[in-house]
Image (spheres, helix red, strand yellow):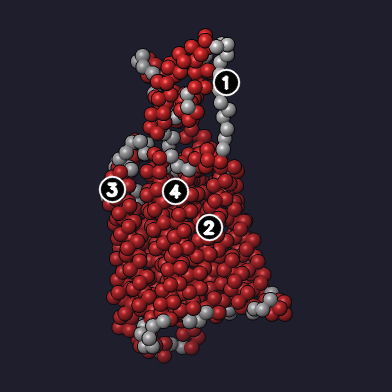
């Protein structure tokens, strides 16, 4: 009779009732349907009994449960409860990467066209790394004194304020701010050999506002993207939600890459149509930095909304997690040295740092060589900026496709497989780029038949290499890295993340830059260093893969520990409820 009764209940209600009974979902979105199904059951049972007595007594069969495309699609999409948290979080990521793309393209145009790509390794070593260390010291001190909400605003606002000041105040007055004459006079006082050795450092001093812009634009990726956004996302997201939806965060965010890339290209086209004598680059910077200001205001508004409507809502965020985000547990303050010692003792953090440093060194080794070819192909800032806009659009499009595949890979093959994709892709495409660079003269006759030049072919292959490497980073490497933080304790989450993301990433890039500086100084040119750089790249990729395999085993163990703790807590809650004579409590959301 029970099966007959269920057969008369609408299919959606019946499925919801069975799922709640078997899995104990306890979701508010299911409660109404379950209640209606339960209320309808006795009425339908009576109707079914009457039908059996008046007819042949046969019970009507239960309708076949078909799994159609709509149901599969619905299972992959966030529920209404989850969407309240994930939609604003995705919009935040969209705006953060929209700004980051503009800053990334603009910093290259400023520095490369003013002083050449050869200055980039020195900027990464002697500007980016000290800036990252200084920020980490300040952040570590502030994290023990202010709330996480205020810390977010205190970190974001100075970045936005500087970029607005650069576009509207600093760049229009570079003639007064840059000590061009003083540097030129200083060069005349130096011996010829020493002058060539100090040229990169003198170029940094001569273009110090561009160097400062470059440093802060680089820190935007480490601080705003990795530390602030992902740190906040990890506070309010469970492991199950992360595995399901972290790859999708980037879908909307990489639409931002497409839009921001085309916005940069639009600004480049505006510069071309200006009357002679008008400083088109100064005008374009005002457009670009205005977009940064608007984007920063939207980011802060979304964060404020989530603090009020999401973090404080126990239906959206686990109460235990919400309390952690709202106020920090009292704990002993650790100095920078003590924090470093604490993190160095953890093989888990060391493996995570090795992956971040491996990516930074690998992409830097390939990218600097590519940008030197790019400047030779596009010496005009307008053409360079337009190419970078198209490059960002291509990166966003490729990442969008890879993230669609990424969700399937995470669910089908797991974290360990996803973590290996980025080093494999970067290694293969990097070897292809270096092979073309090394054997360009031998390939010249074949290249001419293709209707291009070895220089342009190297630029395009390098662009494909960067697109695929960065696309796989956004689709696989970043979600894997952020998922790895979730099972950690508060100390490792906060200060461990600051050390790995803010120091590890610039250290990786600075390490790659330092290697290039040594090779250039020893061999005389970047071209002569290319065979050695290719070998170093493969060594880094192998070490990166080893660190990923080690972390995969530790991550699986920590997941098992977390699940065991959850099951133990659920068993205690059920036992307490049964001893009190009540019904067992519904399981709390997974952490």
Observer able to see residue 352: yes
Q: CA distance from mark 1 to mark 4?
A: 62 Å
Which residue is disc 1 drawn over?
A: 61
Which image quadrant is residue 59 in?
top right
The residue under the point 59% across, 66% down is: 464
Query: Helix, strand or loop at disc 2?
Result: helix
Label 3 vs label 1, nearer the camera? 1
Which numbered circle lies on residue 147? Answer: 3
Describe residue 159's horizontal placement relative to residue 350 as left or right: left
- Mark with earlier residue (4, 3): 3
- Whichever of callouts 1 and 4 sits on the residue coming sooner in the sequence is 1
User: Residue, x 32% and y 63% (percent of image)?
Assistant: 294
Do the residues under discs 3 and 1 have CB atoms within 8 angstroms?
no
Q: Nearer the viewer, mark 2 or mark 4?
A: 2
Label 2 neighbour load within 10 Å: few <14, some 14-19, many 20+: many
Mark carried by residue 343: 4
Up-down: is 425 above or below 122?
above
Residue 275 percent location from the top left of the image: 38, 86
């Amino acid at each position: 009779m029970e099966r007959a009764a269920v057969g008369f209940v609408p299919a959606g209600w019946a499925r919801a009732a069975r799922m709640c009974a078997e899995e104990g979902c306890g979701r508010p979105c299911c409660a109404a349907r379950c209640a209606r199904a339960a209320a309808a059951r006795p009425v339908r049972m009576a109707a079914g009994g009457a039908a059996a007595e008046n007819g042949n007594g046969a019970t009507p069969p239960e309708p076949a449960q078909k799994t159609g495309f709509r149901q599969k699609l619905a299972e992959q999409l966030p529920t209404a409860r989850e969407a309240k948290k994930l939609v604003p979080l995705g919009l935040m990521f969209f705006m953060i990467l929209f700004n980051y793309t503009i800053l990334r393209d603009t910093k290259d145009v400023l520095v490369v066209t003013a002083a050449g790509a050869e200055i980039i390794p020195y900027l990464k070593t002697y500007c980016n790394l000290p800036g990252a260390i200084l920020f980490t010291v300040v952040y570590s001190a502030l994290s023990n004194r202010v709330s996480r909400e205020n810390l977010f605003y205190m970190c974001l606002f100075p970045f936005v304020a500087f970029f607005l000041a650069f576009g509207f105040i600093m760049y229009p007055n570079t003639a007064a701010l840059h000590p061009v004459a003083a540097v030129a006079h200083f060069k005349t006082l130096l011996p010829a050999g020493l002058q060539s050795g100090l040229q990169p450092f003198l170029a940094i001093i001569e273009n110090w506002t561009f160097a400062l812009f470059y440093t802060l634009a680089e820190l935007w990726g480490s601080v705003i993207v990795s530390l602030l956004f992902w740190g906040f996302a990890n506070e309010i997201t469970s492991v199950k939600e992360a595995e399901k939806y972290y790859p999708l965060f980037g879908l909307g965010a990489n639409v931002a890459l497409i839009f921001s890339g085309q916005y940069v290209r639009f600004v480049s086209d505006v510069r071309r149509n200006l009357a002679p004598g008008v400083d088109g680059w100064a005008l374009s910077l005002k457009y670009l930095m205005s977009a940064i200001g608007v984007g920063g205001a939207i980011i802060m508004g979304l964060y404020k909304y989530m603090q009020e409507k999401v973090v404080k809502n126990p239906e959206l965020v686990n109460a235990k997690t919400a309390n952690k985000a709202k106020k920090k547990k009292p704990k002993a303050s650790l100095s920078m040295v003590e924090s470093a010692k604490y993190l160095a003792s953890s093989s888990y953090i060391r493996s995570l740092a090795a992956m971040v440093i491996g990516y930074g060194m690998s992409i830097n080794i390939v990218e600097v060589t590519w940008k030197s070819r790019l400047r030779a192909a596009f010496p005009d800032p307008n053409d360079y900026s337009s190419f970078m806009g198209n490059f960002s659009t291509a990166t966003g499009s490729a990442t969008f496709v890879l993230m669609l595949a990424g969700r399937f890979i995470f669910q089908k093959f797991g974290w360990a497989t996803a973590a290996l994709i980025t080093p494999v892709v970067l290694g293969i495409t990097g070897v292809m780029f270096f092979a073309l660079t090394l054997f360009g003269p031998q390939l010249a006759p074949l290249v001419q038949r293709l209707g291009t030049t070895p220089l342009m072919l190297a630029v395009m292959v390098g662009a494909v290499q960067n697109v695929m490497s960065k696309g796989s980073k956004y689709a696989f490497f970043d979600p894997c890295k952020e998922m790895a933080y979730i099972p950690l304790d508060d100390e490792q989450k906060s200060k461990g993340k600051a050390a790995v993301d803010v120091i590890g990433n610039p250290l990786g890039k600075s390490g790659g830059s330092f290697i290039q500086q040594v090779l250039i100084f020893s061999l005389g040119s970047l071209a002569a260093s290319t065979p050695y750089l290719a070998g170093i790249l493969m060594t880094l990729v192998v070490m990166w893969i080893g660190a990923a395999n080690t972390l995969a085993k530790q991550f699986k163990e920590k997941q098992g520990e977390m699940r065991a703790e959850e099951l133990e807590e659920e068993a205690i809650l059920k036992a307490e409820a049964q001893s009190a004579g009540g019904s067992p409590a519904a399981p709390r959301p997974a952490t």
